[in-house]
Image: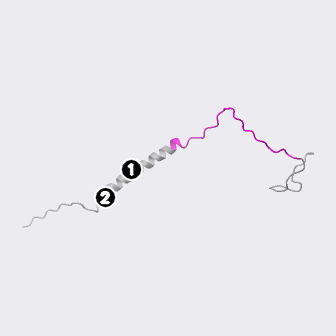
Amino acid sequence: MATIINTPGNNPGNSDGGAGWSVAIIILIILIGVGAYFLLYRRAAPVPAGTGGTNINVTLPSGGTGTGGGTGAGAGAGGGATTP
C-alpha cells in the first residue's frame, strides 16, 4: 500500500497577493503624506508686502488736449479728448 502525502508548497498563483497589497498600502500612505504637506504648507495665503517705506515711482505720460494717436480700440478721428 502506498502512502500519498499532499503538501501544498509554493503555489505561484497564491504567493504574490500579499506583496501587491503591501505596495498599494505604501503608495497610499505616501500619497496621503504628500497631500497633507501641500494642504498644510503650500496652500497658505500670500504674505502682503511689508511696510518698510519702499516707494515705487511711476512716470505717466501727460494727457494732451485734442492730439493723440489714431490707433487702438475706441480711437476715432482726432484720437484724443478735448477739454471744453
Does residue 59 appear left or right of residue 27 in this picture? right
SS under mark 1: helix
- The structure residue drawn at horizontal position 72% and vertical position 36%, both measured from the top left corner, is 55
Residue found farthest to the bottom: 1
Q: Position of residue 38 (x, y in %)?
A: 51, 45
In the rendered view, tell whether residue 48 sits above or below residue 13: above
SS under mark 2: loop
Tag of residue 26: 1
Q: Are marks 2 and 1 in contact (CB under 8 Å)?
A: no
Tag of residue 1: none
Residue found farthest to the top: 52
- The structure residue drawn at horizontal position 35% and vertical position 56%, both measured from the top left corner, is 20
Q: Quadrant of residue 75?
A: bottom right
- The structure residue drawn at horizontal position 86% and vertical position 53%, both measured from the top left corner, is 79
Disc 1 marks a residue whose amino acid type is Ile
The magenta stretch is: 39-64
Count the marks: 2
Q: Is residue 35 magenta?
A: no
Instruction: Calculate the distance from the C-alpha at mark 2 to the C-alpha at mark 1.
Output: 16 Å
Tag of residue 16: 2
Q: Position of residue 60 (x, y in %)?
A: 79, 43
Q: Position of residue 39 (x, y in %)?
A: 51, 44
Q: Give the class, few, some or many, for how many residues have Cα within 10 Å of label 2's Cα (few <14, many ≥20).
A: few
